[in-house]
Each structure stands twice: as C-alpha cells, then as structure tokens.
Image (tube, rainbow, N blue to C red):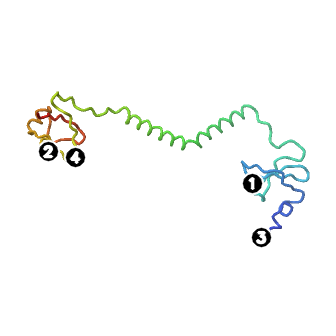
Amino acid sequence: MSRFSRYDTDEERLPDGMQRVGYDADTQIYTYRDADGSYWEGAPGNEYGQLTQVSNGGGPSRHEPIDAALRHHMWEEERKNWRQGWQPLLNFFLIIGLFLMLLTWWLYWTPSEQLPQCGGQAVPYKIHKGDTCWAIAGKHKMRVEDLVKANNKLNCDKLQIGSSICVPSVI
C-alpha cells in the first residue's frame, strides 16, 4: 500500500462541492456534478485533471438541437469515415477472395492431363525423371525405332517429365 494512498479519494482530489457521478466505459470519460447542479466531464482516460462544463445547474444542456439537414450531413460524414476506417481490412478481404478464386480456377477448371489414345497393341507410359528413349525401349524389350514409329512426332531429345507416350506391347 502506498504511503500517499489517503490522497487518492475524490474528497482530496476534487474541488469542494464536486462529486463523481458517472463513468462512460466506451469513451472513458468520468462525469462530475458540482454543488450548484451543473455537470462536468474530465478528459478521456483521466480520472482527475482539467474538467469541462457540460451543462449548467438545473438548466438545459449547452448543446443546441440539431436540425434535420445538419443531422443528415453529419451522418454522411460519419458514413465516409466508417468506409475509410475499414478500407485496409476490406482490401485484405479482396486479396483473400481473389486468391481463393484463382485457387478454385486452378484446381477445377484447368484441363486434367489426358493419356494419349494408344492403339490396341500399345499402352500409355508416363515419362519420369531420367527417362530416355533408349531406357524406355530397353525396359519394354523393344527397339528405339519401334517406339518412335508408335508415337507420331516423338522427339527423343525433348522428352518432358510428366508427359505420356504410347509403348507398343511386344508379344
């Protein structure tokens, strides 16, 4: 306990006749009432300090009623401020949405790799890393010329990994 804790009460810190009557948690503003009935507010976040008068004792508030045109203008300004405040988050959601759309397009709309239509005596073969025409023909116990003849326009120097070719079955 602090040795100055006795000075932390409202009676010690507030002017004579001033009493704390409320606190608004949203704006973090304390409200005080003076001996003559007038209301005062402190600065946001400060429990004590400089006070600002909000209303006179017993009389109406110092704020004048707002006409409809001014109220509409204030509402438009507040709506613009809302958009500006949320703009970075809306941009983030836009980027996430575009990413998800592109991912969906890539997964579902790109054509799947179709195996080549091989004749009745041939089977499809998918080319792997390190495959050459010589190695493929050797695995299937055939000549390279038979492999090239079975695949129209096959260039043995440019085999692409993942592509498919037809390998004739040897009987």
Using the image, determine if residue 14 lies above or below residue 81.
below
Look at 21% across and 41% down and name the residue there: 127
Using the image, determine if residue 61 lies above or below residue 35.
above
Residue 147 in the figure: left or right of residue 58: left
Look at 21% across and 34% down and name the residue there: 124
**CA separation in Å, label 2 and label 1:** 84 Å
Disc 1 residue crowd, few under 14, some 14–19, many 20+, Cα 10 Å? some
| Nearer to me, 3 or 124 | 124
Q: Nearer the viewer, mark 4 or mark 1?
A: 4
The kind of residue tagged 1 is Ala
Q: Nearer the viewer, mark 3 or mark 1?
A: 3
Label 3 sits on residue = 2
Residue 100 in the figure: left or right of residue 32: left
> Marks 1 and 2: in contact by CB < 8 Å?
no
| Nearer to me, 51 or 117 | 117
Give the percent coordinates (x, y) of residue 132. Answer: 15, 44
> Marks 1 and 4: in contact by CB < 8 Å?
no
**CA separation in Å, label 3 and label 2:** 88 Å
Q: Residue furthest bottom?
A: 3
Q: Residue furthest top?
A: 120
Look at 36% across and 31% down and name the residue there: 109
Residue 17 in the figure: left or right of residue 106: right
Label 1 sits on residue = 43
> Marks 1 and 3: in contact by CB < 8 Å?
no
**CA separation in Å, label 2 and label 4:** 11 Å
Element assignment for label 3 = loop
Give the percent coordinates (x, y) of residue 11. Answer: 86, 61
